[in-house]
């Protein structure tokens, strides 16, 4: 026989019905703030986008992980509660959130390691800090329009890391050593 407590006899509060995933509102993103969206929406002389779709999605993925890992600089004091003293359900939620933040930071680290130290700086500036290409060129003292080329290379490498584009096949090499001598040529070594 089960023992009834006061909570068992209390009416349960009605739960809110959740809308299906397709009907839920998605967060709105301002495309005007992203230098990647600007490059993706602009066309070159031939009508091609300045960066490809795979490069755009790779950059946006890095941007989302960078933001979720809380790597963006804070401009004000955070007054949110980070832990509870009771340790109940809220404490577990904070721990799960911290695990997700750590996982996002690890994804950012792995992505930047994959592109290398030469290209990771421009990815952090453009995807993470949303700096414009002109500002990057000015600070690095690069020639005009050079940041666009470097960013394209960095985004291609990032898209390759994420698996959005395939590996570039290496040129086939001959299996034997080539030289200019005849087929029976052998170098002589003078001991003299």
Image (cartoon, rainbow, N blue to C red):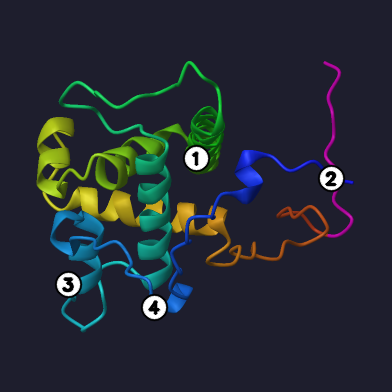
Q: Which mark, by number, is residue 104?
A: 1
* Of labels 2 and 1, the one closer to you: 2
- Residue at left 48%, top 55%? 13
User: Is 157 left or right of 130, judged from the image as shown?
Assistant: right
Ranked by sequence position, the earlier of labels 1 and 3 is: 3
Ranked by sequence position, the earlier of labels 2 and 4 is: 2
Q: Tell me the crowding category of disc 3: few under 14, some 14 to 19, or many 20 or more residues within 10 angstroms, Cα based.
A: few
Residue 178 higher or lower than 105, as above or below: below
- Residue at left 72%, top 61%? 173
| Residue labelled with disc 2 | 2
Could you tell me what secondary structure mostly forms the magenta stretch? Answer: loop
Residue stretch rendered in magenta on the structure: 183-192
Q: Give the quarter of the image for residue 178.
A: bottom right
Q: Nearer the viewer, residue 154 or 54?
A: 54
Location of residue 161 in the rendering, given as x and y in whole percent from the top left corner:
55, 53
Q: Secondary structure beneath disc 3? A: loop
Q: Quadrant of the C terminus?
A: top right
Q: Which mark, by number, is residue 42?
A: 3
Q: CA distance from mark 2 to mark 3?
A: 69 Å
| Residue labelled with disc 4 | 23
Given the current orientation, which residue lies at the most extreme bottom position?
47
Ranked by sequence position, the earlier of labels 2 and 1 is: 2
Ranked by sequence position, the earlier of labels 1 and 4 is: 4
The answer to whether mark 1 and mark 3 are in CB contact below 8 A is no
User: Is 166 left or right of 3, judged from the image as shown?
Assistant: left
Q: Give the quarter of the image for residue 182.
A: bottom right
* Of labels 1 and 4, the one closer to you: 4
* Of labels 2 and 4, the one closer to you: 2
Q: CA distance from mark 1 to mark 3?
A: 30 Å
């Amino acid at each position: 026989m089960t023992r009834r407590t006061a909570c068992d006899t209390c009416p349960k509060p009605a739960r809110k019905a959740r809308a299906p995933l397709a009907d839920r509102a998605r967060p709105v993103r301002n495309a005007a703030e992203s230098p990647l969206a600007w490059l993706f929406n602009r066309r070159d002389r031939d009508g091609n986008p300045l960066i490809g779709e795979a490069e755009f999605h790779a950059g946006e993925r890095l941007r989302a992980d960078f933001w979720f890992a809380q790597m963006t600089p804070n401009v004000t004091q955070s007054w949110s509660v980070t832990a509870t003293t009771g340790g109940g359900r809220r404490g577990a939620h904070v721990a799960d959130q911290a695990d997700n933040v750590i996982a996002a930071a690890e994804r950012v680290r792995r992505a930047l390691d994959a592109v290398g130290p030469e290209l990771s700086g421009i990815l952090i500036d453009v995807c993470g800090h949303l700096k414009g290409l002109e500002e990057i060129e000015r600070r690095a003292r690069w020639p005009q329009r050079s940041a666009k080329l470097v960013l394209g290379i960095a985004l291609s490498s990032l898209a390759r890391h994420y698996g959005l584009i395939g590996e570039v096949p290496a040129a086939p090499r001959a299996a034997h050593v080539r030289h200019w001598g005849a087929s029976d040529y052998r170098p002589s070594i003078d001991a003299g």
